[in-house]
Image: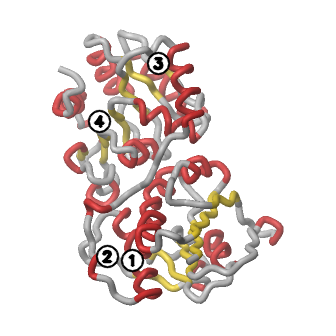
Amino acid sequence: MRFLISRLSALGDVVCTLPVASCLRQAFPESHITWVVDPRFAGIVECCAAVDEVIRAKPGFKSSTWPTFGAPFDAALDMQGLTKSGIVVGRAKSPIKLAYHWQRELSRFFAGPVLPDPSSIHIVDQYVDVARATIEALRGHDPSLAHNDTSTDFALEPKPEDLKTVRAILTDRGVTGRFIAMNAGAGWATKRWPAASFAAVADALAEQGIASVFLGGRAQADHDAFNEVAAAAKHAPISLVGGTSVRELVALLSLAEAHVGGDTGSTHLAAALGKPAIGLYSITKPHRSCPYGQMSNTLYDPSGLARIEPQAVCDLLLAQAICG
């Protein structure tokens, strides 16, 4: 079997789609799975053991930006539901073309939507429903494919060379023991926990000899978010903001004791690696988009993130036997 997955962006969404590849691999162990992804996030897919081939593409108005495929596929899946992700599926030769049900722009012209199972509340489970529908289309109904949270596999593994690089970076920054990864940034300002709250948690950890390593992208907003935390902290936190590639970010989080952040890509990445991921939520519904399988590690206040107290985060870290 040959499968095509079209999920171009963004970081957290790509992470949450990884179980689709694992589900297909479980059903068809000898299959070949190709994933088309935005070059900025290709490192995530490269670390997924269930994916055989990664194609970098950024489809635009010009046909020269569209990927081309040689051999046909048995199924092609649009997991993003946008024109650009639909174009990828449209370019593929395949008798089965299915899509995540939330289709926007012109995506509905390229693939048919798969409605989620009523029991699939989390976005990850809704994505996997597309894989299950694909498998049923190929081999008929299989009771073993029933909804089961415990079987979801992200198949995410850091690369040895990236682990070596990250360990060297941490040592150079003076981090030789246990550390907590934190992300003070987020795509939207309304998804950012106050800098003073991050600083309070980082100070509490520092007093117990646990370093706080802040991560983020290269955007100025991410650097500004960390600088606000540093200015409010009594003990200087460590910044790797903009200092790692996406693959190195996978390695960094695999070495961390836990992650603290809002509804942002690194939170979902930490959960996919099986790390305690303390999620801070307000404007998004945690039952649908919390760190997968870690609702108990999610703090939610619809009135605003500022109402979530630093002590509540410390209590969750204590429950994980990380501090205290």
Of marks 3 and 1, which one's residue comes earlier in the chain?
Answer: 1
Q: CA distance from mark 1 to mark 2?
A: 6 Å
Of marks 1 and 2, which one's residue comes earlier in the chain?
Answer: 1
User: Residue 273 appears in which quarter of the rendering?
Assistant: top left
Of marks 1 and 4, which one's residue comes earlier in the chain?
Answer: 1
- Residue receiving disc 2: 145
Residue 264 is situated, as x and y percent measured from the top left of the image, at 43, 46
Q: Who is closer to the viewer here, 191 or 130?
A: 130
1 and 2 marks in contact (CB < 8 Å): yes
Q: CA distance from mark 3 to mark 2?
A: 44 Å
Q: Is residue 83 above or below residue 175?
A: below
Q: Secondary structure at mark 1?
A: helix
Colour option used: secondary structure
- Residue receiving disc 1: 132
Q: Nearer the viewer, mark 1 or mark 4?
A: 1
Of marks 3 and 2, which one's residue comes earlier in the chain?
Answer: 2
- The quarter in which the N terminus is drawn is bottom right
Q: Secondary structure at mark 4?
A: helix
Q: Who is closer to the viewer here, 314 or 154?
A: 154
Within 10 angstroms of label 3, few (less than 14), some, or many (20 or more) residues? many
**Mark 3: amino acid:** Ile
Q: Nearer the viewer, mark 2 or mark 4?
A: 2
1 and 4 marks in contact (CB < 8 Å): no
Q: How many marks?
A: 4
- Residue receiving disc 3: 238
Q: Is residue 232 above or below residue 130?
A: above
- Residue receiving disc 4: 306
Measuring 38% from the left and 81% from the top, which residue is drawn there? 115
